[in-house]
Image (cartoon, helix red, strand yellow):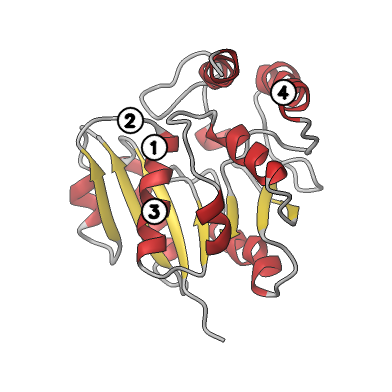
Amino acid sequence: MNMKIFVIIPSFNEAERIGRVLEELSILPYQVVVVDDGSSDQTAEVLKNYSVDYLRHKINRGQGAALRTGTDYALEQGADIIVHFDADGQFLTTEIEKIIYPLKNQEIEIVFGSRFLGIKSEINFLKKFFILPFAHLVNFLFFGIRTTDPQNGFRAFKSSVAKKIQIEQDGGAHCSEILAKAFQNKLKWKEVPVTVLYNRFGQSVFASRGRGQSGLQILRDLLFSKIIK
């Protein structure tokens, strides 16, 4: 059975990097959706060179909001499987097939990428030994979740899952939110090892560098979301 697989790519000021990602995706059998999250660079011009569905936020709303926009669009277009992917080249397009395989074979409902299951990913020292362990603790204390990688944006899920999990966190805390809702809905899930190229495109621990949230900002949003509920 031919399945409609949509790859959602949130992008904020990634004109210098997103072209290489789209070039690699252009030879793969996926429908690519780029959500331009209020970029002020030449992202729109770069995208004219590729066959992608282009959605745009007028203002920068955050990665979670961009993923929500792209996921809702994919559902409207009849997607069977939805993949969340990054615009900056941290993830490998060749690993998309690996992460959707359990979904295509009806084993699992949602798959999470993990940097800690046998594939070496170069991770910032502070992020590895401070940010991520603290995220593990927050996920366990507030949500009762135990996974090997609490903050990985590379994931895939069936369309039925997208209808159950509505992303409410506009920023980077959407990773923990999706995990929590997957557990709350008792979905069949699995972690799959993925590569993350932090040596070239690392996320800052302290500052966002104009390309999304830093690790500390993600933790701030996650904690704040729990305090106000």
14 left or right of 176 in image: left
Mark carried by residue 65: 1
Which element carries disc 2, helix, strand or loop?
A: loop
Note whether 74 is above or below 85 in the view shown: below
Residue 118 in picture, x, y percent from top left: 81, 48
208 left or right of 159 in image: left
Q: Which residue is mark 3?
A: 72
Disc nearer the start of the sequence (3/1): 1
Mark carried by residue 227: none
Specify the amino acid type for callout 3: Asp
Camera sees residue 37: yes
Disc nearer the start of the sequence (1/4): 1
Judge by depth and name the residue closer to the eye, 126 or 56.
56
**Residue at image location 39% in from the left, 29% down from the top:** 211
Q: Which residue is mark 2?
A: 61
State if disc 2 and disc 4 touch (CB < 8 Å): no
Judge by depth and name the residue closer to the eye, 68 or 132.
68
Q: Which residue is mark 4?
A: 142
CA separation in Å, label 1 and label 2 = 6 Å
CA separation in Å, label 1 and label 4 = 22 Å
Judge by depth and name the residue closer to the eye, 34 or 178.
178
Label 1 packing within 10 angstroms: few (<14), some (14-19), many (20+):
many
Note whether 13 is above or below 216 in the view shown: below
Specify the amino acid type for callout 2: Arg
Q: Nearer the viewer, mark 2 or mark 3?
A: 3
Note whether 197 is above or below 133 in the view shown: below
CA separation in Å, label 3 and label 4 = 27 Å
**Residue at image location 28% in from the left, 67% down from the top:** 51
State if disc 2 and disc 1 touch (CB < 8 Å): yes
Disc nearer the start of the sequence (3/4): 3
